[in-house]
Image (cartoon, helix red, strand yellow):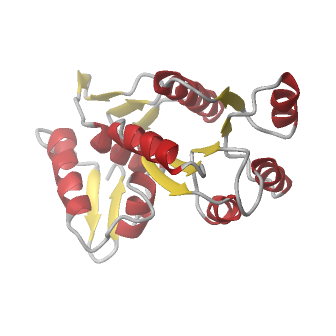
Amino acid sequence: MRVLLVEDEKKVASFIHSGLREEGYAVDVTYDGQDGLDLAESNEYDIIILDLMLPGRGGLDVLEKLRLDQILTPVLVLTAKDSIQDKIRGLDMGCDDYLTKPFSFDELLARMRALFRRCQERADAKLRVADLVLDPASHKVIRAGKRVDLTAKEYALLEYLMRNAGRVLSRVQIAEHVWDIDFDTFTNVIDVHVNHLRRKIDGEHDQKVIHTVRGMGYKIENQ
């Protein structure tokens, strides 16, 4: 999952960024409201974590502009503004959840999972390619009836491939969605992860589902 974090307190941003990366999320961070709006409008995110008191452009203004532009990415407001009136205003303007500081990181993760589940239920659920099944709700991956154990990054990579089954995904697309916007695409990290994933998913099976498209990238499909 790819997350945009818009938070001007750099210590808080660093704490959240580090924690989310450990959980396997790809995270882009900005400390400015206008920069956050620009990133949200030019990239595809699964969730936006948005502070309200921001330089450049206030969080509520960012939220309002996103909804006016029909960008429906789930927004979790994370702010020190804790009055009932502030919460009502944020929810009425289009945020999907509202968490006040100080906060528990475990609660932040739980609220993010809840938002993801809601989106996945709307989009539906289990992803299938041939006899490969990925369940976003439980994070279980099954191939030919057997569970496949993946690292957090391998799971994120497989989910992105399966949500785009049949499409060729370039290394840049994979890097930006599964890692983050600052990832160095000139390294071989993506190829290494794809190879690890291929061994676990395709290794013992005659029917291969993960394919390299030479000079272009990777795709997953039943061939």
Where, by quadrant of the figure, is residue 57 drawn?
Answer: bottom right
**Residue 33 shows in this picture:** yes
Q: Which residue is rendered at x = 23% and y = 69% of the image?
A: 187
Where, by quadrant of the figure, is residue 18 drawn?
Answer: top left
Query: Toward the viewer: 171 or 217?
Result: 171
Image position, residue 222 (x, y; %) = 34, 48
Q: Which residue is rendered at x = 17% and y = 39% of the image?
A: 200
Query: Toward the viewer: 174 or 5?
Result: 5
Image position, residue 175 (x, y; %) = 38, 61
Q: Which residue is rendered at x = 31% and y = 53% of the image?
A: 223
Image position, residue 50 (x, y; %) = 66, 45
Residue 25 relative to residue 99: left or right? left
Query: Toward the viewer: 111 or 151?
Result: 111
Residue 119 relative to residue 147: left or right? right
Q: Which residue is rendered at x = 59% and y = 57% of the image?
A: 31
Give the vertical position of 122 relative to 72 (above or below). above
